[in-house]
Image (tube, rainbow, N blue to C red):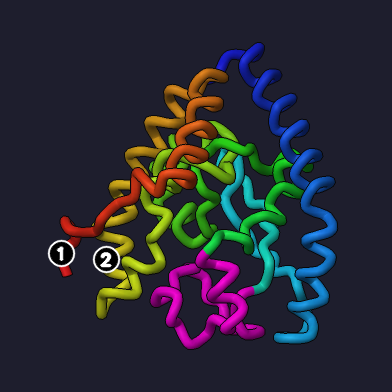
C-alpha cells in the first residue's frame, strides 16, 4: 500500500491531471453535449452507485450511452451490439469517451487516475471480502486490468452467456490484478500504469485476446 507521502503525491497528481483534462476538454465536451441532445435527447449524463474506497458507495459519472431506464444492477452488457445501447453510445463506448466525465469524480476525490475500475454495488456487496482487499485504495480510471481487458465488451458480445463468462472467467482474472495493484500501489507504480496505458493506446498493445475463454 502507498505511504502517506506517496498518497499526497498521488492526490496532487490526480488534481493536476483532472484540472488539465477538464480545461482542455471543455470545448469538445460542450460540442459533444449539443450533439448528444440532438441525437438521443436528455439526459446527457448517467450516474450510478459504485464501490469506492473501503467499499463506501459513491455516484460515478458517465456520458449516457444507453436508452433511458434500461441499465440493470449488474452493469453487464451483451457487447457493443446490445440493443439497449444507442448508436451514438456505441461509438462513445468503443473509444471510452463515455468514461471521461469521471475526471469530475477524480477531482472530487471519489476516484484516482490509477486504481481498480469502480465496480457496481451488487458485486461489492455480494463479495465484500474480495472488494475490501481491492478497495483499500480509491478506484480509478486506469489499472492494469482495465488496460488488458479494455475490449471486455467486445469479448462478452461474442459469447451466448455474458454474465456467466464475466463472473466465472473475467472477474477472477481482473480481481487478482486489482488486488495486486492495491497491495503494491506506490507513486512509481501509479506513474507506470499511466505510461503503460499511453503506450498501449499508441501502439495498440497489451490487449487480452480472449483465446482462453471457455465459450
- Residue 97, above or below 173: below
* Res. 214 mark: 1
x, y percentage for residue 37? 79, 81
x, y percentage for residue 171? 33, 54
Magenta span includes 30: no
Asked if the residue at tag 2 contacts the one at tag 1, i.e. Cβ–Cβ closer than 8 Å, the answer is: yes
Q: Residue at x 43, y 25 (%)?
A: 183
Q: Secondary structure at mark 1?
A: loop
The chief SS type of the magenta part is loop
For disc 2, the neighbor class at 10 Å (few under 14, some 14 to 19, many from 20) is some
- Residue 10, above or below 128: above
| Picture quadrant where residue 85 is located | bottom right
Magenta span includes 83: yes
User: Can I make out residue 50 in this image?
Assistant: yes
* Res. 165 mark: 2
For this view, does 149 lie left or right of residue 46?
left
x, y percentage for residue 190? 54, 27
x, y percentage for residue 134? 46, 38
User: Can I make out residue 132 in this image?
Assistant: no
Q: In the rendered structure, which segment of residues is drawn in magenta?
A: 65-94
Q: Residue at x 56, y 72 (%)?
A: 91
Amino acid at each position: 500500500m502507498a505511504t502517506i507521502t506517496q498518497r499526497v503525491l498521488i492526490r496532487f497528481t490526480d488534481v493536476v491531471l483532472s484540472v488539465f483534462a477538464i480545461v482542455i476538454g471543455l470545448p469538445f465536451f460542450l460540442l459533444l453535449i449539443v450533439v448528444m441532445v440532438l441525437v438521443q435527447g436528455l439526459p446527457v449524463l448517467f450516474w450510478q452507485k459504485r464501490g469506492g474506497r473501503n467499499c463506501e458507495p459513491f455516484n460515478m459519472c458517465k456520458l449516457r450511452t444507453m436508452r433511458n431506464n434500461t441499465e440493470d444492477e449488474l452493469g453487464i452488457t451483451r457487447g457493443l451490439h446490445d440493443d439497449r445501447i444507442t448508436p451514438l453510445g456505441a461509438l462513445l463506448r468503443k473509444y471510452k469517451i463515455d468514461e471521461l466525465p469521471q475526471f469530475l469524480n477524480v477531482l472530487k476525490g471519489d476516484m484516482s487516475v490509477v486504481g481498480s475500475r469502480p465496480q457496481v454495488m451488487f458485486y461489492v456487496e455480494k463479495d465484500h471480502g474480495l472488494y475490501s482487499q481491492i478497495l483499500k485504495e480509491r478506484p480509478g480510471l486506469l489499472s492494469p486490468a482495465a488496460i488488458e481487458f479494455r475490449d471486455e465488451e467486445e469479448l462478452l458480445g461474442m459469447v451466448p452467456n455474458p454474465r456467466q463468462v464475466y463472473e466465472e472467467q473475467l472477474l477472477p482474472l481482473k480481481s487478482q490484478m486489482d488486488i495486486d495493484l492495491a497491495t503494491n500501489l506506490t507513486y512509481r507504480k501509479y506513474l507506470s500504469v499511466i505510461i503503460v496505458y499511453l503506450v498501449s493506446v499508441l501502439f495498440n498493445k497489451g490487449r487480452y485476446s480472449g483465446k482462453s475463454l471457455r465459450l
